[in-house]
């Protein structure tokens, strides 16, 4: 093969690798920025906690959660039926992939998903969850300062000390 | 004939629009009046609301784990913090947060949920009126 053809091949390979890297990093950044939104979801789910991104649980989990709002993790979070139906439809439409369930039951807590554990257990001291400013793993906004807008990127992360 | 038919319709539309305007912009006093009417219907001896009773009710745990103050703070002119999730809650006293007690659907929703969480039952009209009277007595 002539030298110039090899050079072209090398250049092409470099270009493809650069493109792949860019795609990968974009996908990574996107995984930490959630854009799906709905006014009813944002208002209602966001009044007691950050409105958790629908992509963080599979559809079966959202259906189970939304059918038991009158006993929602120890509090009454009941909604008017038509508002609950609208929010359920939004959550199911943008739900994450089903990564398996525990004992045939859908996972009801984002903190119990393998994804959450992987992201939070490795680098963080266990004491962080009882820090007065954090109080609970449900309090995403304590560290993810832009969580209310679906932004969980590293750039907006501030872990309290 | 057509003309006379037009005016009642116009009047009806005006009345409807006025009704919607009232529904969209309630004031804490509107709620107090509604609770007073309900309390009087339930018991003709009803003799008005009490800020002091409201404060006691607000800070008591009523046999359960939480009081109203668990989330809304002992001084509701200040922001509160959700007892479970830690999320900040805007002040409940209207003097500190003018948005409070201005929407019937919101007030109804939160009394339903929170009375259930704190008392394991619905609040009575007297209890709601006492709480609101207490909250309105708070000035910064």
Image (cartoon, grey):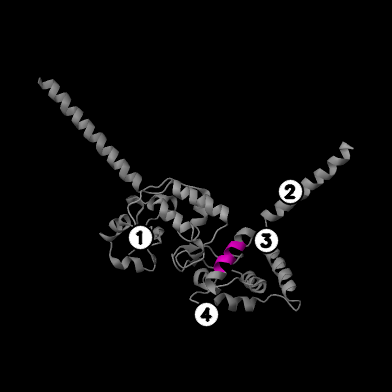
Q: Nearer the viewer, mark 2 or mark 4?
A: 4
Q: Residues within 10 Å of mark 3 (few under 14, many from 20)?
A: some
Magenta stretch, overall SS: helix
* Distance Cα–Cα, label 1 vs label 3: 41 Å
Indicate the secondary structure of the residue bearing disc 4.
Answer: loop
In the image, are marks 1 and 2 on the same chain?
Answer: no
Residue holding disc 4? B63
Q: Nearer the viewer, mark 3 or mark 4?
A: 4
* Distance Cα–Cα, label 1 vs label 2: 48 Å
In the image, are marks 2 and 3 on the same chain?
Answer: yes
x and y percentages locating residue A120 in the rendered image: 30, 59
**Quadrant in which the N terminus of chain A appears:** top left
Indicate the secondary structure of the residue bearing disc 1.
Answer: helix
**Quadrant in which the C terminus of chain A appears:** bottom left
x and y percentages locating residue B86 in the rendered image: 44, 65
In this rendering, position of residue B59 left or right of residue B127: left
The circle drawn on residue A111 is 1
User: Which segment did they paint magenta?
Assistant: B107-114
Q: Nearer the viewer, mark 2 or mark 3?
A: 2
Instruction: Identify the mark nearer the N-term, 3 or 4.
Output: 3
Residue holding disc 2? B17
Q: Residues within 10 Å of mark 1 (few under 14, many from 20)?
A: some
């Amino acid at each position: 093969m002539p030298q110039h053809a090899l050079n072209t091949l090398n250049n092409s390979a470099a270009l493809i690798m650069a493109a792949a890297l860019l795609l990968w990093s974009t996908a990574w950044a996107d995984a930490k920025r959630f854009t799906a939104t709905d006014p009813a979801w944002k208002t209602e789910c966001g009044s007691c906690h950050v409105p958790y991104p629908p992509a963080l649980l599979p559809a079966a989990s959202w259906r189970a959660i939304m059918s038991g709002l009158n006993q929602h993790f120890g509090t009454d979070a009941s909604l008017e039926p038509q508002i609950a139906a609208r929010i359920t439809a939004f959550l199911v439409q943008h739900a994450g992939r089903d990564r398996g369930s525990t004992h045939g039951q859908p996972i009801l807590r984002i903190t119990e998903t393998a994804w959450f554990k992987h992201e939070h257990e490795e680098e963080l001291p266990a004491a962080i969850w009882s820090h007065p400013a954090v109080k609970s793993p449900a309090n995403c906004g304590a560290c993810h300062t832009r969580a209310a807008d679906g932004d969980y990127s590293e750039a907006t992360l501030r872990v309290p000390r | 004939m057509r003309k006379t038919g037009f005016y009642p319709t116009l009047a009806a539309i005006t009345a409807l629009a006025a009704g919607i305007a009232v529904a969209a912009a309630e004031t804490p006093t509107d709620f107090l009046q509604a609770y007073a009417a309900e309390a009087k219907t339930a018991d003709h001896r009803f003799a008005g609301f009490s800020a002091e009773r409201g404060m006691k009710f607000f800070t008591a745990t009523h046999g359960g784990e939480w009081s109203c103050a668990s989330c809304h703070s002992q001084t509701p002119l200040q922001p509160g913090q959700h007892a479970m999730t830690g999320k900040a809650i805007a002040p409940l006293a209207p003097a500190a947060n003018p948005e409070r007690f201005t929407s019937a659907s919101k007030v109804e929703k939160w009394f339903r949920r929170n009375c259930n969480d704190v008392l394991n039952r619905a609040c009575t009209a007297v209890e709601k009126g006492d709480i609101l009277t207490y909250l309105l007595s708070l000035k910064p």
